[in-house]
Image (cartoon, rainbow, N blue to C red):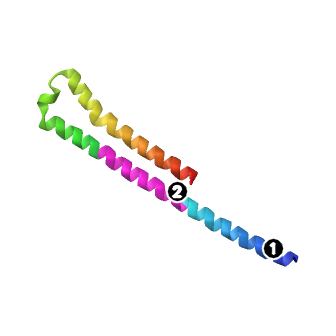
Amino acid sequence: MSAQERERRLAEFNAIQDSSSGQREEHRQHCLEIALTSGLTAGASGSALALSAMLLRPQLVRNSSMRAFALVLTFFVPFSLTHEITRGACQKARTS
């Protein structure tokens, strides 16, 4: 194999590698966008659902301990779910 042939093949190989790298980065960005969108949607809908339940049924949260528990459910659970969804998708994006 001549030096020109080796150089041409090396250039082809490098072009394929660059293309593959760009596709991986695009896939990673797409995974992150999906993670953020679904995570924020889950968090917002969970908070809205819990808050509307507290407003529609105030007798469920009459005493202070139940009210505190309801607030934890309203905010902590949906946002921890958001965190888990985002973390899982980011991890998948890193490994792909």
Tell me which residue sits at (84%, 78%) in the image: 4
Q: Is residue 49 left or right of residue 1?
A: left
Judging by the rendered image, the residue that carries numbered circle 1 is 7
> Which three-letter amino acid code belongs to the residue tagged 2?
Arg
Q: Which residue is mark 2?
A: 28
Q: CA distance from mark 1 to mark 2?
A: 32 Å
Mark before the other along the chain sequence, 1 or 2: 1
On screen, 85 above or below 69?
below
Residue at 26% from the left image edge and 27% from the top image edge: 69
**Residue 84 figure quarter:** top left
Q: Locate residue 80, reporting x and y percent.
A: 38, 37
Q: Main secondary structure of the magenta part?
A: helix
| Category of crowding for the residue at label 2, using alpha-carbon neighbours closer than 10 angstroms: few (below 14), some (14–19), many (at least 20) | some
Circle 2 SS class: helix
Q: Residue at x 56, y 54 (%)?
A: 96
Disc 1 element: helix
Residue under the point 33% across and 40% down: 78
Q: Which mark is residue 25?
A: none
Judge whether residue 35 is colored magenta: yes
Q: Position of residue 40 (x, y in %)?
A: 35, 48
Using a 10 Å C-alpha cutoff, classify the residue at mark 1 as few (fewer than 14 neighbours), some (14 to 19) or many (20 or more): few
Q: Label 1 is placed on what type of residue? A: Glu
Range of residues picked out in magenta: 26-44
Image quadrant assignment for residue 54: top left
Q: Quadrant of the N terminus?
A: bottom right
Q: Position of residue 52 (x, y in %)?
A: 18, 40
Front residue (pair 95, 72): 95
How many marks can you see?
A: 2
Q: Is residue 81 magenta?
A: no
**Marks 1 and 2 close (CB-CB < 8 Å):** no
Tell me where residue 25 appears, x and y as whole percent.
56, 59
Residue at the limit of the structure toward the right, as seen here: 2
